[in-house]
Image (spheres, rainbow, N blue to C red):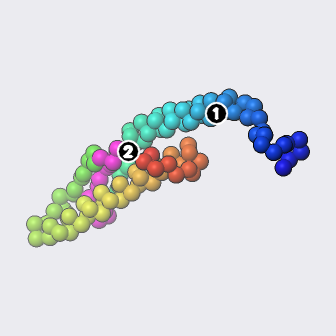
Amino acid sequence: MGKGMRAGKKPSAGGGKANMQKQLQQVQQMQRQMEEMQQELDEKEMEATAGGGAVSVKVNGKKQITSIQIKPEVVDPDDVEMLQDLIMVAVNEALRQIEELSQNEMGKLTGGLSIPGLF
C-alpha cells in the first residue's frame, strides 16, 4: 500500500467528474471534425484509367461511379470480354483510390485509431 493509505480506504477521486466531462467534450469535438471531414471526402472525386486511357472511370467520395468514358476504338463487338475487363479494372482502381484517400484523411484525425464502422 502507498504511503498514507489504510486498508479499506479508496484514494479520493478528486476531479474525476470534471475529467470525464473534458473527455466527453473532446470526443464530441472529434465527432464533429469527422463529420466535416466525411462531407469533404464525399465531394472528392478520383479518376482511374485502364488500357492506356481507353477506359476512364470517376468515383466520388460516396463510392459512387460518376462517369465512365470509353474510347470508340476500344469497342470491338468481337471482343466484348476485353472491354468488360478494362471497365472492371478502372472501376476497382478508382474505388481503391477513394478508399485510400478516406483512410488517410480519417487517419490524420483519429491518429491511427481503428474505430469500427467509421468508414
Residue at numbered disc 1: 20
| 4 and 76: which is toward the camera | 4
Q: Which element carries disc 1, helix, strand or loop?
A: helix
Q: Does the magenta stretch include residue 15?
A: no
Residue 44, image quadrant: top left
User: Which residue is found at the position 52% from the left and 52% from the top?
Assistant: 114
**Camera-side residue of 19 and 9:** 9
54 relative to 2 in the view: left or right: left
> Which residue is drawn at the image coordinates 69% and 33% (left, top)?
16
Q: Quadrant of residue 87?
A: bottom left
What x and y, as percent, mark residue 51? 29, 65
| Residue kind at label 1, given as amino acid type | Met
Which residue is painted at 20% across and 64% down in the image? 84
Q: Left or right of 90: which side holds 104?
A: right
Where is residue 38 shown, x and y percent of the image? 44, 39
Q: Which of marks 1 and 2 is nearer the N terminus?
A: 1
Please identify the quarter of the rendering in which residue 23 is found. top right
Total label count?
2
Q: What stretch is highlighted in magenta?
A: 50-64
Which amino acid, mark 2?
Answer: Gly
92 w.r.t. 7: above or below: below
